[in-house]
Every structure is written in structure tokens, then in C-alpha cells.
Image: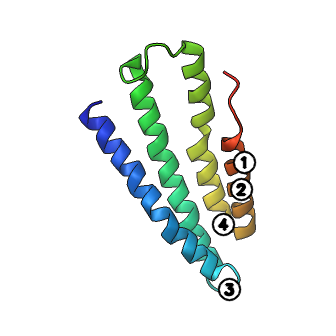
Amino acid sequence: MDQTLLVLNLLILLCIAFIPFSTAVLAENLQDANHRQTATLLYGGTYTVTAVFFVLLWLYASSDRHLLDGHLSDARIRTRTLRYLPGPLIYGVALALALISPWITLGIHVALAVLYMLPLDD
């Protein structure tokens, strides 16, 4: 544990604490065509920023293995890194697609939620 890890963890926790608000805004405005896009942008932006901070935390903790359990294999670390790295990019693309169709964005969010719930075989 060090100061940088604590700050990155705090940033993730701040994002997570914001998720109920952005979800409530989305739920309240999903049926309103005038506000659906804005609500989806807020929701998608929340998850995009959360994913960025999560990846930064993982990369920091796994660099030089200085903050990971010594029993973790290089293969497991590599598998996790490869699984986590595309997240911010995919969330960012989904966020941009909200300008075309909020429903596409929400579909991508559902797909990512399912993907990240699947167990890792490492």
C-alpha cells in the first residue's frame, strides 16, 4: 500500500458513489425523448471515468508486481491486464454512440456488465 494507490482507490470509490445518481437520472429520463440522450451521456460518462481509474489502479498495482501478492503468476497478471485494458476504450466508444442512439449505448453497457461477470479461466 502506498499513497498513489490510496488516491487511485479513492477516485474509484468517488466514481462508484456517483453511480446511483447517474443511474437515477437515467431511469427518470429514459422514456423522455428530450432528455434521454443527456441522461445516457451522464450514465456512460460515469462508467467511462470509473473504468479509466480502475485500469490506472490495476496498472499501477501490477507494475513491477510491487503491490500484488507474490503468488500471482505472470500469466494471471497478463490475463487480467488484457481483460481490463479495453474497458475504458469500449466505454468511451459507447459514450460517443449515445450521440447516435442512447439504446445502443445502453446495450453495450449491458454486454460489458455480463462480460465482466463471467469468470476468468486463468
Report the mark closest to the observer, 3 or 1. 1
Q: Residue at x 67, y 56 (%)?
A: 109
Q: Give the residue at mark 2.
A: 110
State how many labels appear. 4
Q: Disc 3 or 2, which lies upstream in sequence? A: 3
Q: Is residue 61 visible?
A: yes
Looking at the picture, does residue 3 appear above or below residue 68?
Answer: below
Q: Residue at x 52, y 69 (%)?
A: 22
Q: Which mark is residue 114?
A: 1
Looking at the picture, does residue 46 appear above or below residue 29?
Answer: above
Going by the numbered disc 4, the residue's amino acid type is Ala
Query: Residue 52 placed where, x, y %?
Result: 48, 46
Going by the numbered disc 3, the residue's amino acid type is Asp
Q: Disc 4 or 1, which lies upstream in sequence? A: 4
Q: Disc 2 or 4, which lies upstream in sequence? A: 4
**Marks 4/1: CA distance?**
20 Å
**Marks 1/2: CA distance?**
6 Å
Report the front residue among 86 and 74: 74
**Marks 3/1: CA distance?**
27 Å
Rendering quarter of residue 115: top right
Q: Is residue 101 visible?
A: no
Are there few (<14), some (14-19), or many (20+) residues within 10 Å of tag 3? few
Q: Give the residue at mark 4.
A: 98
Query: Residue 19 placed where, x, y %?
Result: 50, 63
Are there few (<14), some (14-19), or many (20+) residues within 10 Å of tag 1? few
Where the C terminus falls, by quadrant? top right
Query: Residue 44 placed where, x, y %?
Result: 58, 61
Q: Residue at x 62, y 24 (%)?
A: 79
Report the mark closest to the observer, 2 or 4. 2
Q: Secondary structure at mark 1?
A: helix
Q: Disc 4 or 3, which lies upstream in sequence? A: 3
Q: Secondary structure at mark 2?
A: helix
